[in-house]
Image: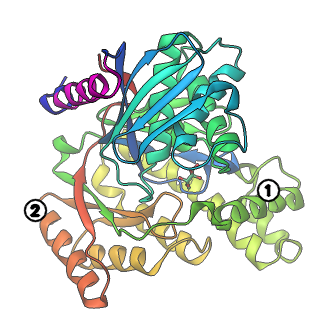
Amino acid sequence: MSAEVADVTLAIRSAFSDRFGRSPEGVWAAPARVNLVGEHTDYNDGFVLPLAIDRRVTVAAARRSDDLLRLVSLQKGRQELRLADVRPGAVSGWAAYAAGPVWALAQEGVEVGGLDLVIGSDVPVGSGLSSSAAVECAVVLAARDLYGGPRDAARLALIAQRAEHEVVGVPCGIMDQMASMACTAGHVLLLDCRSLAADQVPFALADTGLVLLVIDTRVSHALADGAYAKRRRDCEHAARILGVPALRDATETGLDAARDRLGEVRYRLARHVVRENARVRAVVELLRVGQPEMIGGALSASHASLRDDYAVSAVELDTAVDAARAAGALGARMTGAGFGGCALALADAETAEEVTDAVTAAFADRGFRPPEVFATSPSDGARRLA
Ligand code: GLA
């Protein structure tokens, strides 16, 4: 355990003792993620390539003999609920992310009882780094270890996703929960979102002289405002028109033949998905032959496609990507759902500082709030810390 993780563990244990007057039974952590490439492909049964970053949600927990859920978020405050009152539509605000996974685990037939939970996080909220999936995954792990349930990472990710779908009310794909559960340090996770087969692909940045920068535009994306759900519905509609189970099964030739029937909006959404899946495969091939410095073109092409065909970028994301590339980044793209949130840029270690300065200057020129730029590297997935 790194010194930083040891400190975090100690801090959350003592926060638990302060709030509840006893020691927790354990401490769990689940990381945030960025997606290297493969955006808006997960709910089309396609391929994604996320990595866990070194920012995380930490949970200290202990069982109770009644059915109370006493929830403390070190960022958001305190809430008390009865387990019997947790169900779809009944919990709102931050408590849904913590109570939802306990409800979802119970739906698997696990006899879940009450819990005291303290939740800490250093993941910026609403920045597209999956802070919500990190909370869900940390709570699922804690509740599973204390009350029993599946061991398999994919099953646990599906439980966390069910909480997001039914209790939080956001129709997300499976990428974020799988990334948080199943990523490993030094790797990106190649996930087939149809079968949930997961492959660890080496991405040891430190050995390659490359730096992966996360650029938080600090503009909040509106995942719940309907734009995400609308893309998802349009994609499903496009698949029905094409007569395929999901857009993962479509081809560009098939799309071109059906362009009139699809209509321009659905045609372009589908074209993004088909090409993005191909980009994931191309990037994986390059990483497998040890050429991470060659993936920049695919990252930048992914951004252009999300901006022009999928229409989920934002002026701040485009500014970040353009400034990063002009300053010598090998490639850059928005990451996550879009509409704000984060971009990432891959740069040689020698140019990383110039890239950071250029993005910051471009934001100042346009009168945007200063972005937060930080380097990250592939980190561990969700796990028990103590
Ligand atoms: C959000 C969702 C994911 C995925 C991305 C876009 O992060 O939670 O499931 O759809 O957007 O790739």
Q: Disc count in the image?
A: 2
Q: Amino acid at mark 1?
A: Glu
Write down the residue under mark 2: 350
Write down the residue under mark 1: 236
Q: Main secondary structure of the magenta part?
A: helix
Question: Can you say whether 184 is above or below 286 in the image?
Answer: above
First of labels 1, 2 by sequence position: 1
Q: Which residues are magenta?
A: 7-21
Across and down, in percent, residue 74 comes to 33, 41
Q: Nearer the viewer, residue 123 or 156?
A: 123
Q: Secondary structure at mark 2?
A: loop
Residue pictured at 28% horizontal, 65% vertical: 330
Q: Nearer the viewer, residue 324 or 63?
A: 63
Q: Amino acid at mark 2?
A: Glu
Mark 1 vs mark 2: in front: 1
Mark 2 Cβ and ligand 1 under 8 Å apart: no
